[in-house]
Amino acid sequence: MEKRTPLADADREAALKDLPGWSYDPHARAIRRHFVFANFAEAFAFMTRVALAAEKMDHHPDWSNGWNKVDVALSTHSAGGVTVLDLALARLCDAAAVSSPAPPPK
């Protein structure tokens, strides 16, 4: 399957079973997840790790941040829906969320 071809509904739903915490938003044609961290530094570190990897993938998340929270929505806009690129970026987000937490505040 071409990376930028939207997944069939059944394929997307099957893939989401292996991505705990992610859900499909039919209005946005995107998969979403809400991440909560211990503090702003951890949330920002997460966003930095994902941003650097996303840039290498040439595939960028739609997200928002408020203190220790990050809301992520993934969709391949040029394809009009969720593709394998979004699934790969979701896995990357999950890995980035558990890797090296920020140092404690001074």
Image (cartoon, rainbow, N blue to C red):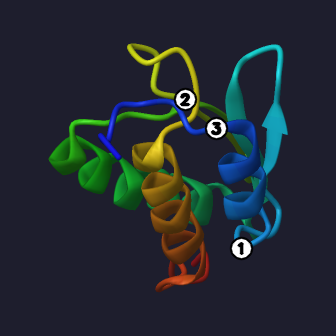
Side (left or right) of 28 relative to 86: right
Number of marks? 3
Which is nearer the eye, 2 or 83?
A: 2
Residue 56 image position (x, y, % from top left): 16, 49
Q: Residues within 10 Å of mark 2 (few under 14, many from 20)?
A: many
Q: Residue at x 59, y 69 (%)?
A: 94
Residue 17 image position (x, y, % from top left): 79, 68
Q: Amino acid at mark 2?
A: Ser
Which residue carries the number 3 mark?
Answer: 8
Residue 43, placed above or below residue 96: above
Q: Residues within 10 Å of mark 1 (few under 14, many from 20)?
A: few
Q: Are marks 1 and 2 in contact (CB under 8 Å)?
A: no
Residue 8, placed above or below residue 21: above
Regarding residue 84, the answer to whether it shows in the image is: yes
Q: Which mark is residue 18?
A: 1
- The answer to which of marks 2 and 3 sits earlier in the sequence is 3
Which residue carries the number 2 mark?
Answer: 75
